[in-house]
Amino acid sequence: MARPIRHVPRDTSRRRAWVYVAVTAFIAADILLVVLALGSTRNTDAAEATRPIPTFTSASVIDPTAAPTPTPTPTATPAAATILPLPTTRLLGAVDAQTAWRAQTGACPATAASPELTTDGGATWKPTDATGKAKVTSIQRLMATSESVVEMVGLTKTDCAPQFVKSFVAGDNYSAYPDKLTGTWFVNPADRATVHAPDGDAKAPCTSVVTLAVRNDTSAAALCADGRLFATEDSAATWSSPVTVPGAVALNATDTGYLAAAVVRPDCAGVQLLTLSPALESTEAGCFKTAAQPASLAGNLAVSSAAGTIWLWAGDAFKRSADGGVTWE
């Protein structure tokens, strides 16, 4: 008996073909998505690779095993050199704008008393001899009254005791006047803790007076080795509170108070002049510029004034100023 013929409908074959097409399209789309995803990842990785690598300072990353960095110690600014006054080797006494006396001094009895006189503003100097005439050495105080008259306190050649000497003839002759010593201001270098005033010996305001500036019988100022200044108005019975004038190395009396010379001052490359009232209130005056080392001027500087003229003897320089130290000649 013959097998009956099976009939396959055409629609079933067509459906199967479309299924294959759909599956193929799905797979292709899936592959495409994967490729696109991989490409996007590569681009992202490339972009990340081109970005700068972040860096961190030592403050951002702390190594717990590292030793702590020490804090830098601030460097101190060097302080200006401190120059203290020394017993002077220069004495200067101005009479007027053209006339003055000067002298050098030192240890007794080796240092002769040889004052010099100028009457032409320091252009020339006339030497005189007080040691040969009056047997005095080591001048401690010089008091110029005029071209003809000059007084001084020195130390005797025999035992270095204080001695008062005077000339009435411009230094052509000198004589000792022991009776005048009692009423005269001076400091004996053998005892700088004592000041001799017209009323007698008195305790100095410090342990070592290096310069005594005298205005009259009752008023004077003392410059001490530690740089302090003191004033008295009662013949050394009492002294003022100390005043410090930084760098002061010389002092002299004026008609209105005192005149000081200082070194190592911020606005003066040389010698700064200062005027002081009787109460030692200071005001800066002129400046004498010099290349001399400040330390070399301590003890080797003298200043005086008269008739509106300041006379200055600083190291190897000898100058005058008629305008308060603004200009020098």
Image (tube, helix red, strand yellow):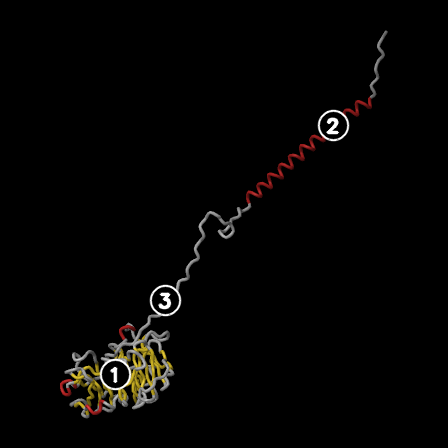
Which mark, residue 187?
A: 1
Q: Nearer the viewer, mark 1 or mark 3?
A: 1
Q: Is residue 200 left or right of residue 13?
A: left
In the depicted view, which residue is nearer to us: 171 or 321? 171
Pointer 1 or 2: first along the chain? 2
Categorize mark 1 by other alpha carbons within 10 Å: few (<14), some (14-19), many (20+).
Answer: many
Which mark, residue 288?
A: none
Where does the C terminus fall, quadrant-wise? Answer: bottom left
Please determine whether, in this image, residue 97 is positioned above or below residue 249. Answer: below
Element marked by disc 1: loop
Q: Residue at x 20, y 88 (%)?
A: 164
Q: Is residue 230 left or right of residue 124?
A: right
Identified by mark 1, the residue type is Val
Q: Position of residue 282 (x, y in %)?
A: 37, 82
Categorize mark 2 by other alpha carbons within 10 Å: few (<14), some (14-19), many (20+).
Answer: few
Q: Residue at x 55, y 42 (%)?
A: 49
Please determine whether, in this image, residue 166 is positioned above or below residue 261. Answer: below
In the depicted view, which residue is nearer to us: 5 or 237? 237
Residue 243 found in image quarter: bottom left
Pointer 1 or 3: first along the chain? 3
Q: Position of residue 190 (x, y in %)?
A: 22, 80
Identified by mark 3, the residue type is Pro
Which mark, residue 78?
A: 3
User: In this view of the protein, can residue 320 be seen by the observer?
Assistant: no
Q: Which residue is mark 2?
A: 21
Q: Residue at x 76, y 25 (%)?
A: 17
